[in-house]
Image: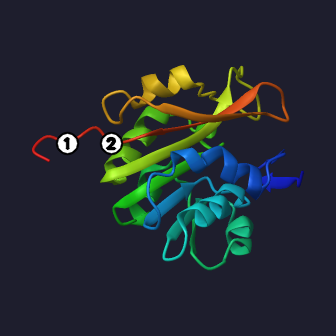
Amino acid sequence: MVVTHLGPYIAYVNVHDAVALIAPAIHMPGGTWADLGAGGGTFTRALVRLLGPGTTVHAVDRDAGAMAALRVPGISTHVADFADEEAWRALALPPLDGILLANALHFVRDQRALLARVAAALAPNGRLVVVEYEGRAPSRWVPYPVGMERLGELVSGALTAPVRVGARRSAYGGSMYAAWAEPVPREGG
């Protein structure tokens, strides 16, 4: 297995593993997506592979070095803190067909507010795909854990109940899961 750097920690997930984990959550080819907290880009590259030609994936991360290394066809990089409301607005992303949060949501203190912004940024048939750790206690590397049950509580009202589509053993013990949710239909829409 290839060791890939993702943010401040090492995750034992390569692009092939990432494709296998999130593939069941991808509902249509092509389109415009965002990968929030893209880090080294393992899941970003997996997303581009799964979505195919003509796809644009906006990779967003605070790490300018990681974003510079991720400049490849199909990926538009943005150096920004996606969890910061002002930085989010400044991104001025178009309505998105999908948003990926892979091992990033557990770094966000106000997860409910972020997920409300994510829901508002999705096109009507858009999809949020989340990869997170199941059953983790708060730690330096996972300060705000988001197990499946917690994810369901956080998205309530803004997104549909999350659907778990995959899991794999984590190199750090326990497991990681992949799930998707869609925007709750808006009034009058």
Q: Is residue 62 visible?
A: no
Given the current orientation, which residue lies at the most extreme bottom position?
73
Question: Around disc 1, counting alpha carbons within 10 Å, would you say few (fewer than 14), some (14 to 19), or many (20 or more)?
Answer: few
Q: Is residue 87 visible?
A: yes
- What residue appears at the point 63 percent right and 65 percent down from the top-left corner? 49
Q: Looking at numbered disc 1 in the image, what kind of residue is underneath it?
A: Arg
- What residue appears at the point 42 percent right and 48 percent down from the top-left corner? 127
Question: Around disc 2, counting alpha carbons within 10 Å, would you say few (fewer than 14), some (14 to 19), or many (20 or more)?
Answer: many
Which residue is identified by label 1? 186
Horizontally, residue 41 falls left or right of residue 157, namely right
Image coordinates of residue 90 in percent, x first then y, are 41, 64
Callout 2–callout 1 Cβ contact below 8 Å: yes
Vertical position of residue 96 compared to residue 26: above or below = below
- What residue appears at the point 68 percent right and 31 percent down from the top-left corner? 133
Horizontally, residue 40 falls left or right of residue 121, namely right
Image coordinates of residue 100 in percent, x first then y, are 54, 51
- What residue appears at the point 66 percent right and 77 percent down from the top-left corner? 71
Horizontally, residue 112 falls left or right of residue 5, namely left
Q: Looking at numbered disc 2 in the image, what kind of residue is underneath it?
A: Pro
Image coordinates of residue 129 in percent, x first then y, are 52, 45
Image coordinates of residue 181 in percent, x first then y, are 42, 38
Count of numbered labels shown in the rendering: 2
Vertical position of residue 91 compared to residue 1: above or below = below
Secondary structure beneath dot 1 equals loop
Report, in whole angstroms, how far the alpha carbon at label 2 lies from the one at label 1.
8 Å
Secondary structure beneath dot 2 equals loop
Which residue is identified by label 2? 183
Label annotation for residue 128: none
